[in-house]
Image (spheres, rainbow, N blue to C red):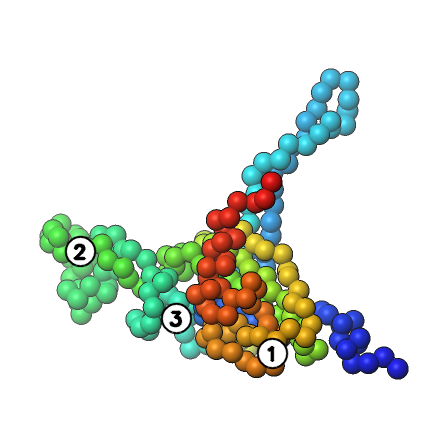
Amino acid sequence: MADSTSNAVAYSSFSGIDILAVIDDLPIATLQGISYSITREKAPIYTFGHANPRSFSRGKRGLAGSMIFTLFDRSALYQIMGGDRNGDQDHWYYAKEGDQYALDSGYSADPWKWAADIANDTITPGRFTTTKRPAEYMDQIMPFNITLIAQNEYGLAAWKAILGVEILNEGGGLSVDDITNEEQSTYVAKQATAWVPIEPGTEGSFYTGTGQPAPGVTSVQPANATTIAAYKTWLTGIETTPAAP
């Protein structure tokens, strides 16, 4: 009779309920779907006397995808965008003159004054300064990494990272016929790792964004990254370390 260990090794697949998505150090509980696509330019090289290509020239590579979020009582990535105006400011952006005028103390109480001042060309010089502010749109969020962590009930785990993500588009819709509501976004990224399996029986810290250990849970932190800072450093190394010749 086969033992439970051999059965667990045989069933090494994962479903969506087994996967946790983490943006930098923050688990994204509203994400219900993510896609990614990697394309590369390759051109055939032809010479006289041959109808078939003699070789292929390799060019640039692109990585893009989309994310689908369930809409609850706040927008997707609300906390990362700084919607609560608290916490770390890693994903805030530097506003230009005139950006986010509604947040400026002189206009937030009377937004029509802003429109009138523009019409009358009476905007006070020097009123606005370049400051680090919460993002109002997803495309203003600073680049981030997405880590996908999978662990099934057999105790098997794997992970994948998408690095240097930049949001391009965001959208959503509401209908009386929809039982749930969604928001979507598309993105481009700099790089992605392959899905990397974690050896069965490995004990360690499950990466939940808190850096706290969860005894007895299969480790999904590569390179002995036992803290959030160590994991970020490890991901940065992937982006900056040249490939071995």
| Residue 236 seen anywhere in this rendered image of the structure | yes
Foreground of the two, 227 or 34: 227
Q: Residue at x 33, y 65 (%)?
A: 89
Q: Residues within 10 Å of mark 2 (few under 14, many from 20)?
A: some
In space, the residues marked 2 and 3 are separated at their CA atoms by: 25 Å
Q: Sequence order check: which comes first, mark 1 or mark 2?
A: 2
Q: Residue at x 68, y 68 (%)?
A: 199
Q: Residue at x 56, y 71 (%)?
A: 20
Residue holding disc 1: 217
Q: Residue at x 47, y 74 (%)?
A: 211
Q: Is 110 located above or below residue 56 in the figure?
A: below
In space, the residues marked 1 and 3 are separated at their CA atoms by: 27 Å
The residue under label 2 is which amino acid type?
Phe
Helix, strand or loop at label 3? It is: helix
Name the side, left or right, on which 38 lies relative to 109.
right
Q: Is 236 located above or below residue 205 in the figure?
A: above
Q: Residues within 10 Å of mark 1 (few under 14, many from 20)?
A: some
Label pair 1/2, CB-CB below 8 angstroms: no
Foreground of the two, 195 or 219: 219
Q: Sequence order check: which comes first, mark 2 or mark 3?
A: 3
Q: Is 182 located above or below residue 170 in the figure?
A: below
Residue holding disc 2: 128
Q: Which mark is residue 79?
A: 3
Quadrant where the N terminus sits is bottom right
Q: Which mark is residue 172?
A: none
Q: Sequence order check: which comes first, mark 1 or mark 3?
A: 3
